[in-house]
Image (cartoon, rainbow, N blue to C red):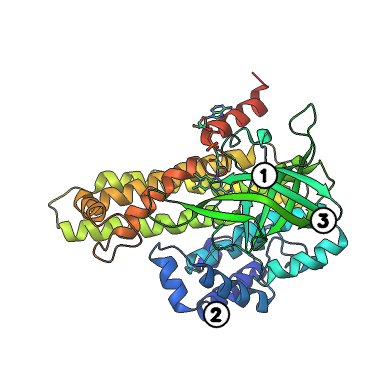
């Protein structure tokens, strides 16, 4: 029985899978696949190179409608695309543009904004970061204070954002600002796009425990941005923000990547067991890996349902929160297994070397960094506690 038959795929989908496999193997540069396979961080240059290759092929935006440059694939094709790309160690699509702000522009932008902004996301020339959180507004995002006042044909922005991933390498930020002060804090918020080289913007790095440079604070001091960079109606940005957050919590790539990490960690444990040659018992770790496999398969089913609902514009309910919760949990468990497999000695050596970058002296550094990095998965994009509250409220009514 062939793999395709075993998956129960019809001939059309099986042929599509083979086409994707051949493309992934021949078109994705081997040096980029090596980075992904080793669990190292993909750089902006590598992401952009891969995006350009996909764009040239016409596959730059699998989730967008055809009329704005998307593929028009159905649900099964989109899931197969994510699966095949992950199986072949191709980088995931850069989420901030294609998965977050792109769909918001498609849904709420004017015809002029779509024509001006979407092609630059598709070909990778615009690299966005997300300016939502502030020092006093994370889970309680609607408390945000960064302001934007209208001055002729410009908004003038003042305030501060925090935990802004990739701000140091992005050329655009999509951000929530307060354009008027209303009785209800969700009102008077607007979503605006700002070029990062606008005078008055200062980016300061935040050092995180994984040693990878990705987090920043961003300060805005009398930053002037064209008023036609505001997406949707002024003061109605909360609707755009919620639309975006739902999509942020369910990128199909997350579930496919979970499978990729599971396979990598399985290889790591098997190699560690081989080297230990019976001096240490690895059966407990293999058992934990099996449980992770079961949970990531469950997440895959949830993801398939949610993607279908998205395509048919049905309400998503608890699905984004449930998927986000599960992916964060399984990712943490997998990297904990990896850390157990590499053993405490490697972790000590890594920390002794400064715990920075991908320490050349400690071959297992990538897994230690991945372990550290995934601690933040239950915080970034909405904490697990808040997701559980969202699920409970939706299923059982507000407490
Ligand atoms: C790695 C990383 C990347 C990030 N990237 C970005 C980014 O690119 N852009 C961006 O805008 N933000 C980003 N964030 C910020 C992230 O969205 C916030 O950290 C998150 O929403 C939590 O907000 P907070 O840090 O203010 O914590 P708080 O909201 O102050 O929460 C503190 C604790 O209280 C709990 N808590 C809060 N409210 C409730 C409640 N109602 N019920 C139960 N428990 C509650 C939380 O679960 C948490 O344990 C990132 C964060 C991390 C860690």
Left or right: 183 with respect to 169? right
Across and down, in percent, residue 154 comes to 81, 54
Residue 324 image position (x, y, % from top left): 56, 43
Question: Is residue 111 at least partly visible in the picture?
Answer: yes
Left or right placement of residue 225 versus residue 21 in this view: right
Q: Is residue 198 left or right of residue 166?
A: right
Residue 25 x/y as whole percent:
50, 77
Percent coordinates x, y for residue 381 in the rendering: 57, 44
- Do labels 3 and 2 touch, CB within 8 Å? no
Q: Quadrant of residue 320?
A: top right
Q: Is residue 263 left or right of residue 355?
A: right
What numbered label is drawn on residue 295? none
Residue 12, picture quadrant: bottom right
The residue labelled by disc 2 is 27
Q: Residues within 10 Å of mark 1 (few under 14, many from 20)?
A: some
* Quadrant field for ligand 1: top right
- Image disc number at residue 246: 1
Residue at 58% x, 51% y is: 218
Query: Considering depth in this image, is 324 or 184 the residue closer to the camera?
Result: 184
Give the alpha-carbon distance from disc 3 to disc 2, as whole Å: 33 Å
Mark 3 lies on residue: 109
| Mark 1: secondary structure | helix
Where, quadrant-wise, is the C terminus in this rendering?
top right
């Amino acid at each position: 029985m062939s793999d395709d038959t075993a998956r129960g795929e019809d001939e059309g989908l099986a042929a599509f899978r083979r086409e994707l496999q051949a493309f992934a193997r021949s078109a994705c540069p081997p040096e980029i696949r090596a980075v992904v396979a080793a669990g190292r961080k993909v750089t902006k240059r590598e992401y952009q190179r891969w995006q350009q290759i996909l764009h040239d092929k016409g596959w730059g935006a699998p989730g967008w409608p055809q009329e704005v440059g998307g593929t028009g694939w159905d649900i099964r094709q989109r899931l197969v695309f994510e699966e095949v790309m992950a199986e072949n160690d191709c980088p995931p699509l850069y989420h901030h543009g294609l998965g977050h702000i792109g769909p918001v522009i498609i849904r709420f932008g004017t015809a002029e904004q779509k024509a001006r902004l979407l092609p630059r996301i598709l070909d990778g020339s615009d690299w966005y970061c997300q300016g939502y959180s502030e020092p006093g507004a994370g889970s309680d995002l609607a408390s945000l204070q960064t302001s934007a006042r209208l001055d002729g044909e410009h908004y003038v922005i003042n305030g501060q954002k925090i935990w802004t991933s990739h701000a140091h390498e992005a050329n655009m930020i999509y951000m929530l600002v307060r354009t008027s002060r209303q009785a209800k804090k969700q009102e008077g918020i607007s979503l605006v796009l700002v070029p990062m080289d606008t005078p008055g913007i200062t980016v300061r790095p935040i050092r995180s425990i994984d040693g990878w440079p990705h987090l920043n604070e961003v300060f805005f001091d009398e930053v002037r941005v064209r008023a036609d960079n505001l997406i949707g109606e002024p003061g109605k940005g909360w609707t755009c923000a919620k639309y975006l957050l739902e999509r942020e919590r369910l990128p199909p790539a997350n579930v496919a990547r979970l499978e990729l990490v599971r396979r990598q960690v399985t290889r790591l444990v098997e190699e560690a067991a081989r080297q230990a040659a019976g001096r240490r018992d690895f059966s407990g770790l293999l058992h934990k890996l099996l449980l992770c496999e079961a949970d990531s398969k469950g997440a895959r089913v949830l993801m398939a349902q949610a993607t279908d609902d998205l395509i048919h514009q049905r309400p998503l309910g608890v699905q984004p929160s449930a998927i986000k919760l599960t992916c964060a949990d399984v990712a943490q468990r997998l990297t904990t297994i990896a850390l157990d497999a590499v053993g405490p000695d490697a972790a000590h050596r890594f920390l002794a070397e400064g715990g920075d970058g991908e320490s050349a002296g400690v071959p297992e550094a990538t897994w230690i960094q991945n372990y550290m990095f995934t601690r933040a998965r239950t915080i970034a994009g909405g904490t697990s506690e808040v997701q559980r509250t969202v699920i409970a409220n939706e299923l059982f009514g507000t407490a």
